[in-house]
Amino acid sequence: MTAITTERPQAGKNRSMTLPAARRFLLWTGIVVLLAWVLVPIYFVALGAFGGRLGVFRWPKSIWPSNLAIEPMMQFLTIEGVFNALVNSLIAAGLTVLFSIALGAPAGYALARYTFRGQNAYRLLVLLTRAFPLAILALPLTVSFIRLGLYDTPFGVSLIHTVLALPFAALVTQSLFMGIPREYEEAAWVFGCTRLQAFMRVVLPLALPGLAATAIFAFVISWNEVFAASILTVRERTLTAYLLRILAESPLHYRFAGGFILIIPSVLFIFAVRRYLFAVWGIASK
Amino acid sequence: MTHPVSLSAIVAAAALFGGLTVAEAQETIFYSTQLRPIEEATKVRDVLLKGLPGKTTYVVDEPPAFAVRMKAETQAGKRTASVVGALHGELQPHVQADLQPIDDVAAKLADRGIPENLMELGKLGTSQQQYIPWMQATYVMVANKQALQYLPEGADVNTLTYAQLQQWAKNIADKTGQRRLGFPAGPTGLMARFFQGYFYPSFTGGVVTPFKSVDAEAGWNAMKELWAVSNPNSTNYNFMQEPLLSGEVWIAWDHIARVKEALALQPDQYVAFPAPAGPKGRGYMPVVAGLAIPKDAPNRAGGVAVIEHMTKPETQLATAAEVGFFPVVKVDLPQDLAPGIKLLAGAVAATQNARDAVVSLLPVGLGAKGGEFNKVYIDTFQRIVLRNEPVKEVLEAQAKVLDTLMKDTGAPCWAPDRPSQGACPVQ
Amino acid sequence: MPARASWIPYALIAPSVVFLGVLFIVPLVQTVWLSVATGDGISLENYQRMAGDLNFSLAVRNTFLLTLVVVPVQVALALAMATMVTKLDKGRDLVLWVLTIPLGISDLAAGLAWLSLLQNTGYLNSALYALGLISGPTGWLSQETPWALFFSIAMAEIWRATAIVLVILIAGLQLIPKEFSEAAEIFGARPWTRFRRITLPLLKPSLQSALILRTVLAFEVFAVVYALGGRNFPVLAGEAYVWQNDNQNYGVAAAYAVLIMTISLAATAVYLRVLRTRPEQLP
């Protein structure tokens, strides 16, 4: 088998020398177009954020930066309570990642490996949490939270964010575990591993992309979530709740500034985790 | 399962974070729906609340969140705020269940000179004082100076009629090719108040009673013509300061707080003036924000102190100078106001002192149905003006909805409608 | 091979069931109750009110239209993106990172970004003006240009949410063994055939997850639509929000929410059936 696979690529290279180059060019053009498509609107947000108070109202708008003003940004960061809110956001997001993986990964494994009665009902239950707009649950949720003593805490907020992130955790890990052949685990059992050891040594490393994806979703959902975070807290607000709520009516350039700054933590988190999305390039190379 | 963090660690963390929010006994939380934008909120914290003993924390929220939180905390029996600040219409649904009477505070402030009719509004239809008036505002029109050259012959911008406004906008549309009259008809725009406080009183002399009268029909036809020369993006506008600043709109109607930015940034570019007059007068609606103490407030004394502080003449003047909301107490505005605020103050004074002014008060007694009341007018606007449905039929249908609403709430008529016995009738 | 220790799956899902039960099901039941309970007993009054409302049929139509257009485009786009990214060897991480940046953008920022592009005095018009294609600020988002508005909203939604599908598909693509593709190449299969016959079927579980999640979220579309469309483009979740916050009528808002939920669950049931993957079909 190895003989065949090592021969073929060389033959291919000889036969279609020019094709890869043309294909490569097409590939890279496509990539550049996609990158531009993603980055251009963000660039405009940055322009609006740094363009000063009146920059957002100019006509015609110039696509080059002009009249850069850092004051609105600085003013942002010195608003009373911003640092506290930042800490709250990080706590809530961190706890959300923890909880959603802790609750969602086992469920995903169960759905992938076992056929059991009620599995479709469980899937629907999990999806139900996203199918119902959270904003409508505000009143009963707030009352429950006050009664349970979870009101005005980042921990309480993280619980609701976990509810929102759970469908991603369960469904994504399910599809991942489904893609990992049962035979690997069974082979490990044959070699004397317990169920748990087999899981940890064989399945978990292969499931890292799925877990990374779940972590990304959980973090981003928690970080960007504004509604529950503002309803369920009074003084211990998350940064996004704190800023986005009041930004909706602030002058336009502030909205750009806020929108721009608030992207940064999510972007950093995805950057940190990105390698795990490609943890194993194809099972064959394992 | 595979997770290293144990349950006990999580519980410990929760206790720690939960404990971080235990309120100090002396702290007063001032929870408000007003002065939300960043700059205003910062001014409240840094300037307006200075001089209060103890720690006062200013927390803001949008009106929907405010409503949910007030209700939820009542249901759960636990309150976080000791004093709340909100618009009359936002406090209305909470009377009885979520607020406590503050007749004692009213007595203390008797010498401040707060007008009797405002204090009466503060009773929210009950026999006890529910809120103390905090600041007031109204709606004005703003025009870019570039638009002034297109005014029709003989029209004075301070005493316009709706017909003249329409002609003015038409001139601009014809001569510049762009429709530059704008209204805040977006999802969070205050268009409903335009119809209740300005449009209906000016054309019919009332708000509820003449809803489907012949005068109303004439008014809606005039509105259609006005819309024909208005910027179609109006259904996206929530705050008129933005289209004003971008030049998309040259003439706008909106709440003073929502045009303030434009006037403050470029005071030499704009003029502010009262809304137009119709056949029955120049309708306008004063807006009142009030301070109330919620039921089960943790620090009532602190809340009372905040109310007393915010209604002091010095604080009221500072409020006007810093954030452009006008005083409710008897006090003279200083001469050295910022140019933008000066423009607004001039327009407000012109509105209140106009000879043909028709005051349209805020609805009292609608309780939680205030929003549905607004919906009647907005739906009428959508159907007649945006969807071109026949005026008479729409008015018939919507009048039925309005009538049901009034009967359900039992709210008596308010100015400019003539007082009624029992629920306000739709004739 | 179904496990004989049949309590294991139940033990694995138990914590999440309890969690959801307390934090979600309880408030949900309370809210659904709100939609059917009026002053004296159960009635469908709120649902009738909802269905008779001015904007109801528009909201239903708009939401479905948007979902039907946006979701397939996003899945196709995400597949294309994922395939392209996996073909890179250098810079793969960075490209993927950039493509997932929209995930981190809040609805406010996304709405702002596209508004700044498309509004009368926005960047698109500035560019068209510089090219001489238009004579002055032109409206694309108003009532008078409904198709331009729809297209704009669809574009903004596609931009904002494709990354969700992308991340799920990338994670799924990792697990497809390279040998299958290489074996097919040996036997002369062209790239498109390889994609259709090997990659897609093996990607079914991930596709199913991505489609379900994306569709359910699509039925709740709201913030960006309102930023761009204002009152011109009602959608179901927006109407629910308006009834709750502006009209202060929690009953009708709950009715809308139940409607959204029912539609989403129905769509999910369809996906579960159509995209069912039998264990034998997987590697």
Image (cartoon, coloured by chain):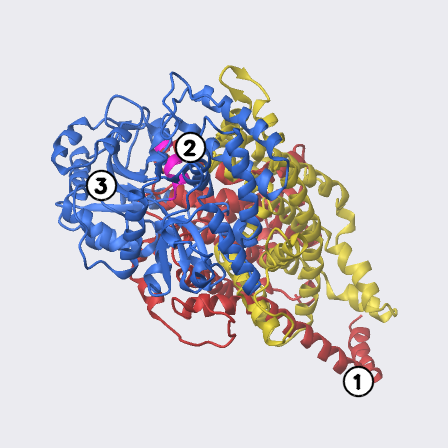
Q: Is residue B49 magenta?
A: no
Q: Amino acid at mark 2?
A: Gly
Q: Are marks 1 and 2 in contact (CB under 8 Å)?
A: no
Pointer 3 local density, CA inside 10 Å: few below 14, some 14–19, many at least 20: many
Q: Give the camera-side residue of C137 and C68.
A: C137
Q: Which residue is mark 2?
A: B205
Residue occupying the point 52% across, 60% down: B172
Residue C241 versus residue A156: which sits nearer the camera? C241
Residue B48: x %, y % from top left: 20, 50
Quarter of the image where one finds residue C17? top right
User: Which residue is tagged 1?
Assistant: A18
Query: x and y percent of residue B312 in the render?
Result: 15, 43
The mark that comes first in sequence, 2 or 3, is 2
| Residue at 77% in and 43% down | C274
SS under mark 3: loop
| Chain letter tied to red | A
Residue B10 is drawn in which quadrant? top left
Q: Position of residue C74 (x, y in %)?
A: 67, 57
| Residue type for callout 3 | Val
Q: Which chain is yellow?
A: C
The residues colored magenta run B62-72
Residue tagged 3: B328
Is-magenta flag for residue B70?
yes
Per the image, label 1 sits on a secondary structure element best described as: helix
Which color was chain B given?
Answer: blue
User: Of the residues shown, which amino acid type is indicated by label 1?
Assistant: Thr
Furthest toward the front, the residue is B154
Q: Residue furthest top?
A: C40
Q: Chain of mark 2?
A: B
